[in-house]
Image (spheres, helix red, strand yellow):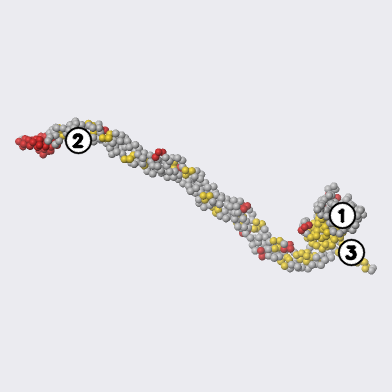
């Protein structure tokens, strides 16, 4: 507590300022501690321990900073944002007389004090900057009036090589503080000499410690007297926070930023600042990402797969399986048309191949000599042993001798032979070979040769040409090669087509008319007509006399 005594006549009045030393025993830090001493003799907390009776290096009541440094920083954490009235700094004297002859005096010159809500002085406000003291004028104890608000009070000094500084100042920076007292109110929202009066404005968080004028609003409020809520989309301290991805920014709580109406698609949490977890998206993050190539690239708002789909899926969300006939990433690859439906991921023909094809992808034709479903069929008798069509077995160049049909698997019909059974066997064959046309079962009577296309040799006829023509043919041994009938009739005394019958051998057993016919046949090629008529009349007369 700090105070002021005033004497008026015989009366002594004590006007007491009930500001507390709000720095006392709070956490402290220094940038460069002197390591040549124990920590207890040099630590940052020595400046807020309330002790200032021994200001020497061995007293353990001062901060001792490192030597030969270009900057020196020390700060104290008030643990919350508080109202500050004034500060009092006790610098290290070494318990020696203070002044130009004291070696610590030049170290004190040129210091600054900042008040900040963080440990970064650049984010705070400058409370004091020494620009006028000299070794002759700077006191060992300095009082600084600084009605401000903050959580951190930062002492800073520098001796930067690229800046100029007065010759009185020591060439290196130090922060040899023996006590740093900060007087103000221990609780926020109050003011006055004894910190007993609440700030007059309801939403005022910090007011001037002396006048009560509002100097900072409670989170969520703004305006000269903190009478206004933050604008839509803003909240918090000095309305400086951006609302998250609220579904309706007008329902972003102006104090704490909570999205009262929920989050935009793709976000979660009370403040709607967190994107959906990996693999989820959409309203309340309730949707599951599709089959994205990379789940990290599933857009948290709409589920779009930004780097495309995994194999087997298509569409912006990669939830649509590839249609029949397509496979692979994004379904851009076509299944072989020879597939009976391929795997949408790999393109493998998992249901087998169309006839004529084989292989995992049905891209290989059947092996030579096979065709059809699963290449299980054997080609027929194609011409010159050429390959048949791998799908339907058709012999494209025709059939080998002895076979017919598109597949060349049908034997030639009877009496046909050769390639595609186009050749007709000789009619004189008794069944020819379907390949060669050779009459393998022999010839019909009267023919010979392997194709039965040769008539029997002269003088022979009949089956296998083994029968001889009659010697009683008019021209001996000249008969028809099939029937054996004599070509020009019989010699005299013989009759019959083959001239093997003797004339009149049954003359007396037949009637006249028959005998007349027999006589005609027997002599029709032997006698001249006049002679025949004479013989006939003679025979007739003789018969009548009988």
Badge 2 local density, few (<14 within 10 Å), some, or many (20+)? some
**SS assignment at label 1:** loop
Q: Which residue is mark 2?
A: 487
Labels 2 and 1: the sequence-earlier one? 1
* Residue drawn at 95 percent across, 68 percent down: 10
Badge 1 local density, few (<14 within 10 Å), some, or many (20+)? few
Cβ atoms at labels 2 and 3 below 8 Å apart: no
Residue 158 location (% of width, % of height): 82, 54
Residue 377 location (% of width, % of height): 43, 42
Can residue 529 be seen in this snapshot? yes
Q: How many marks?
A: 3
Front residue of this view, candidates 23 and 158: 158
Labels 3 and 1: the sequence-earlier one? 3
Q: Is residue 343 left or right of residue 103?
A: left
Query: Residue 306: which quarter of the image?
Result: bottom right
Check the picture and name the quadrant holding the N terminus.
Answer: bottom right
Front residue of this view, candidates 397 and 186: 397
Q: Which residue is mark 3?
A: 4
Front residue of this view, candidates 68 and 300: 68
Can residue 78 be seen in this snapshot? no
């Amino acid at each position: 507590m700090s105070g002021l005594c005033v004497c008026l006549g015989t009366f002594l009045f004590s006007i007491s300022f009930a500001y507390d030393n709000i720095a006392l025993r709070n956490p402290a830090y220094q940038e460069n501690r002197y390591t040549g001493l124990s920590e207890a003799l040099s630590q940052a907390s020595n400046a807020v321990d309330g002790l200032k009776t021994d200001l020497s290096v061995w007293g353990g009541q001062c901060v001792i900073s490192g030597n030969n440094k270009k900057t020196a920083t020390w700060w104290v954490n008030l643990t919350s944002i508080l109202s500050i009235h004034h500060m009092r700094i006790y610098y290290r004297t070494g318990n020696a007389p203070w002044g130009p002859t004291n070696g610590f005096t030049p170290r004190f010159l040129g210091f600054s004090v900042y008040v900040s809500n963080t440990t970064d002085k650049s984010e705070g406000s400058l409370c004091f900057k020494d620009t006028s003291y000299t070794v002759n004028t700077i006191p060992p104890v300095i009082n600084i009036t600084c009605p401000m608000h903050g959580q951190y009070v930062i002492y800073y000094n520098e001796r930067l090589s690229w800046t100029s500084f007065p010759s009185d100042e020591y060439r290196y920076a130090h922060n040899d503080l023996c006590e740093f007292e900060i007087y103000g109110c221990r609780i926020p929202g109050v003011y006055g000499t004894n910190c007993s009066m609440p700030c007059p404005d309801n939403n005022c968080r910090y007011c001037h410690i002396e006048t009560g004028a509002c100097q900072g609003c409670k989170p969520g409020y703004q305006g000269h007297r903190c009478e206004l809520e933050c604008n839509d989309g803003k909240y918090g301290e000095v309305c400086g926070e951006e609302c998250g991805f609220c579904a309706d920014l007008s329902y972003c709580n102006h104090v704490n930023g909570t999205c009262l109406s929920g989050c935009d698609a793709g976000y979660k949490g009370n403040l709607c600042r967190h994107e959906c977890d990996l693999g989820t998206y959409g309203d309340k993050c309730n949707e599951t990402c599709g089959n994205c190539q990379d789940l990290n690239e599933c857009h948290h708002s709409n589920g779009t797969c930004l780097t495309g789909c995994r194999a087997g899926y298509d569409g912006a969300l990669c939830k649509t399986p590839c249609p029949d006939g397509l496979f692979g990433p994004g379904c851009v690859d076509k299944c072989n048309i020879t597939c009976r439906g391929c795997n949408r991921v790999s393109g493998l023909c998992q249901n087998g191949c169309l006839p004529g094809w084989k292989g995992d992808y049905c891209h290989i034709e059947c092996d030579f000599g096979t065709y059809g479903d699963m290449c299980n069929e054997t080609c027929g008798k194609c011409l010159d042993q050429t390959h048949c069509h791998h799908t339907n077995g058709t012999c494209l160049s025709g059939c080998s001798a002895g076979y017919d049909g598109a597949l060349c698997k049908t034997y030639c019909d009877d009496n046909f032979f050769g390639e595609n059974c186009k050749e007709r066997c000789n009619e004189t064959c008794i069944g020819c070979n379907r390949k060669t046309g050779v009459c393998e079962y022999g010839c019909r009577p009267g023919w010979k040769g392997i194709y039965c296309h040769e008539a029997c040799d002269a003088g022979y006829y009949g089956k296998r040409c083994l029968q001889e023509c009659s010697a009683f043919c008019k021209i001996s041994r000249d008969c028809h090669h099939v029937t054996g009938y004599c070509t020009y009739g019989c010699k005299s005394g013989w009759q019959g087509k083959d001239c093997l019958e003797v004339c009149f051998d049954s003359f007396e057993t037949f009637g006249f008319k028959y005998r007349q016919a027999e006589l005609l046949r027997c002599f029709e090629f032997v006698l001249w007509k006049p002679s025949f008529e004479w013989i006939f009349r003679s025979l007739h007369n003789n018969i009548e006399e009988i």
